Image (cartoon, coloured by chain):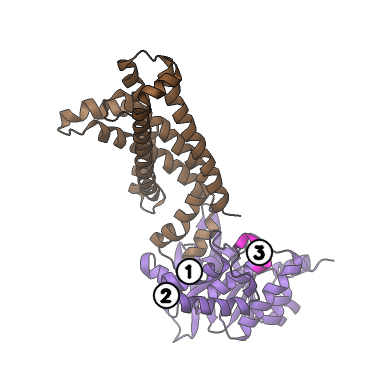
Chain colours: A brown, B purple
């Protein structure tokens, strides 16, 4: 079966699997960013136990393959009485990992701010939480657009581990199994999925560059 | 302790170490309301550190610092509220890089004092006009010259209606032709009766504007006095050597 035939026969299902991948990417990335901000605030807080917990979090989830985490979630958690559906397991695992990388990006963005501006903010009378909210987070976000774009693309590609659990609709990689179970498309099914991934990643890279040019802080 | 003092800032037996280094040694200094005190001395003498202890950007090991007769708050909300009453101008300007000039000036009043946006912006524009950078209000800091940025930093401090202002080498990072535009703003403040503690190497400013010169070396206050007296008749060898070295040959 050629690529053309695969598209002709499974085009509609491919569209829904592409949308499934996109939706998971958005949810995982947004959740990862939010959790990453939280972890980062812990890591820069004046309270030492919070800093330790934040650093520990990053060391744990940055250094475990997401697929291993997924296996633990799917097979081990039910023994602890926690039974989550497959999609939830997948999304939570990816969020946990993305948050650790997002936090590392934020930390480098924060380090670029420089202690002078923080001292100036303290001198004006701003509290720790005001400094974080008004000075640190906006600047860290705006200086990390490019690394965050890379992380977004990595998140997109990581959702491929969704092929290891049954999902309805499947995401792009699981779609390959779906097609090959119903026909003999072979490599052509992979090619269609790969084109969808690459096209999405190129678009994200392009948008990331544009956004970076727009919000980058001139120093 | 002596009977009621009118000093707005009082430092009593203040000591501070950086590891082995004794950066502040038994510092005693009173600053009266409306007084302009200039701290001078060789680099590493502790003058910047002293200046920064007054709004507790540097903590002290022992001794006490009083503002309006009350010990400085240690931390938290009280410390933030205290800092809001003291203006601070840094060597490297430290404007908020992601905010416009106008937003740099209105941030404190709006977030700390709760001033409504319109009122804060109106006052900020007046202050920016006063320091001569009103046309730059909608630019970001990186688009301004160093001298302009430092004048904005002064306006940002003034917007908080400070009871005293600290200047930590405000002209040391500036190109020579920009030094005067910043000093002129400071002269204006002094004339209006602002209480100022200024760390500087600008001897003409010290002589012309200050009420008192404090000379520091090796973490100690070596001598202090009226500017003319200090510059013309320094009492200590260290001060004589220092003045000779900066006057050149």
Q: Residues within 10 Å of mark 2 (few under 14, many from 20)?
A: some
Q: Nearer the viewer, mark 2 or mark 3?
A: 3
- Examine the rendering and report whether any part of residue B72 can be seen: no
**Residue bounds of the magenta highlight:** B140-148
Q: Please tell me whether residue A112 is drawn above or below residue B45 in the rendered image.
A: above
Residue at the extreme left of the image, as rendered:
A81
Which mark is on residue B144? 3
* Residue beneath the point at 57% across and 54% down: A217
Q: Mark number for residue B107?
A: 1
Q: Is residue B144 magenta?
A: yes
Would you say A205 lies left or right of A45 here? right
Task: Tell me whether the residue at label 1 lies in contact with that at label 3, contact meaning CB atoms closer than 8 angstroms.
Answer: no
| Residue A179, position as x, y percentages in the image | 34, 20
The local secondary structure at tag 2 comes to helix
State the residue lying farthest toward the right. B249
**Horizontal arrangement in the rendering, residue A55 relative to residue B234 (left or right):** left
Structural distance between the alpha carbons of marks 1 and 3:
19 Å
């Amino acid at each position: 079966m050629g690529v053309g035939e695969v598209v002709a026969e499974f085009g509609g299902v491919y569209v829904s699997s592409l949308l499934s991948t996109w939706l998971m990417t958005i949810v995982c990335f947004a959740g990862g960013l939010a959790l990453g901000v939280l972890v980062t605030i812990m890591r820069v807080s004046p309270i030492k136990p919070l800093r330790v917990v934040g650093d520990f979090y990053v060391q744990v989830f940055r250094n475990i393959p997401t697929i291993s985490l997924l296996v633990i979630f799917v097979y081990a958690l039910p023994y602890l009485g926690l039974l989550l559906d497959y999609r939830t397991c997948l999304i939570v695992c990816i969020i946990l990992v993305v948050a650790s990388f997002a936090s590392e990006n934020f930390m480098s963005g924060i380090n670029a701010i420089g202690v002078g501006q923080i001292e100036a903010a303290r001198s004006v009378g701003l509290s720790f939480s005001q400094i974080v909210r008004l000075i640190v987070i906006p600047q860290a976000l705006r200086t990390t657009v490019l690394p965050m774009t890379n992380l977004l693309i990595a998140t997109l590609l990581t959702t491929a581990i969704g092929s290891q659990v049954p999902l309805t609709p499947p995401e792009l990689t699981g779609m390959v199994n779906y097609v090959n179970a119903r026909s003999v498309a072979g490599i052509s099914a992979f090619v269609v999925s790969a084109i969808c991934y690459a096209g999405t990643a190129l678009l994200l890279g392009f948008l990331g560059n544009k956004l970076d040019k727009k919000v980058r802080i001139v120093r | 302790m002596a009977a009621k003092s009118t000093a707005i800032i009082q430092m009593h037996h203040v000591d501070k170490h950086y590891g082995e280094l004794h950066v502040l040694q038994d510092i005693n200094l009173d600053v009266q309301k409306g007084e302009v005190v200039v701290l001078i001395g060789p680099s590493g003498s502790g003058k910047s550190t002293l200046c920064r202890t007054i709004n507790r950007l540097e903590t002290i090991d022992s001794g006490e610092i009083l503002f309006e007769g009350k010990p400085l708050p240690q931390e938290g909300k009280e410390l933030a509220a205290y800092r809001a009453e003291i203006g601070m101008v840094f060597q490297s300007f430290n404007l908020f890089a992601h905010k416009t000039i106008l937003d740099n000036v209105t941030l404190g009043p709006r977030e700390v004092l709760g001033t409504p946006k319109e009122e804060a912006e109106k006052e900020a524009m007046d202050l920016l006009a006063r320091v001569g950078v009103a046309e730059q209000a909608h630019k970001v800091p990186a688009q301004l010259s160093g001298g302009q940025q430092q004048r904005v930093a002064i306006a940002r401090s003034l917007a908080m209606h400070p009871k005293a202002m600290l200047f930590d080498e405000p002209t040391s990072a500036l190109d020579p032709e920009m030094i005067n535009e910043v000093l002129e703003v400071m002269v204006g403040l002094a004339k209006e009766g602002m209480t100022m503690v200024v760390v500087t190497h600008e001897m003409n400013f010290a002589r012309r504007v200050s009420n008192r010169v404090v000379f520091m070396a090796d973490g100690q206050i070596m001598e202090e006095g009226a500017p003319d007296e200090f510059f013309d008749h320094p009492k200590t060898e260290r001060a004589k050597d220092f003045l000779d070295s900066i006057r050149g040959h």
